[in-house]
Amino acid sequence: MKLLNELLSAAEDNNSPAVDVRVGVSWTGVVGQYGGVCKTYGTPVAHGNYTRDMGKLDEKDTLELAEYARSWNLVEASIGVAALNSMFEVKGKDGNVWDIIPDVSKDKKVTCIGNFHRPYLGSIAKKLWIIESNPALVNPKAGIINEAAIEYTIPKSDVVIVTGSTLINKSMEHILELCRKIDAYTMVIGPSTTMSEVLFDYGVDMLAGVKIIRPSDLVKKISHSGGMINTKMCAGELVFKILEK
């Protein structure tokens, strides 16, 4: 977990008490030095979720929680990545990456890791492969294929768009390794994205995530949502940010 080790090392100077920790159906949020969110992985499961020190997470500091990112319990890993994200001051320019992606992808072969529900991308790209890790969402007729396909699609790609949540399931480092071998233009995007320049050392060209401007309000929405929360529902608590290499 070399990438994760380097991200933890880069974040440790901004360690602070964990003011609040919330795990929602779709997002997990941590309030520390800053605010951090990421996708919630691992729910629901038949055996229930047993998170280490459940009920006492806000008695830890954010670096302790960020260590949870190493866990193969993906709920714990989600807490860990949200805590990690709460330790980075988000820099870069304001902007929505989906205003940029059409120009970057035009007439290019594109692998999109994560189904971002942008069907128009298929008419812009020369070739589009959409990779999805959730078997229930795989639909080859719609061009949504199994995650094992990255070994075949990335080597053929000019552009690779990676969801930031791949840090949670431990696939990001291998994905970026494949991208570096072919020098593809590589973007890591979405609210889960860890906005750290460490990722530039792994071949990433653009980071596109969020800066949380009202962390306490955001985590309250996560726990009050009762279901699937999204960026539109949290527009008053965050802004989209783009950081280029």
Image (cartoon, rainbow, N blue to C red):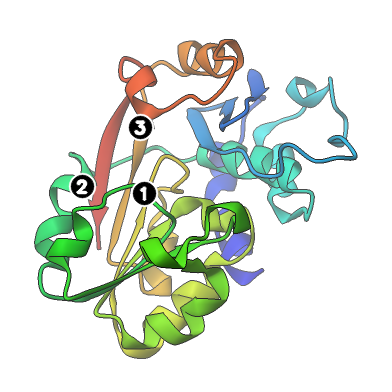
Query: Residue 146's image quarter?
Result: bottom right
> Which of the two discs, 1 and 3, sits closer to the camera?
1
- What residue is shown with label 1? 116
Which of the two labelled residues, at mark 1 and mark 2, occupies the earlier sequence position? Answer: 2
Q: How many marks?
A: 3
Report whether 238 appears left or right of 84: left
> Which of the two discs, 1 and 2, sits closer to the camera?
1
Q: Residues within 10 Å of mark 3 (few under 14, many from 20)?
A: many
Depicted 127 relative to depicted 93: above or below = below
**Residue 218 location (% of width, % of height):** 47, 17
Q: What secondary structure is found at the residue carrying circle 3?
A: strand
Q: Amino acid at mark 2?
A: Trp
Q: Is residue 141 visible?
A: yes
Q: Amino acid at mark 1?
A: Phe
Q: Amino acid at mark 3?
A: Lys
**Residue 56 location (% of width, % of height):** 83, 22
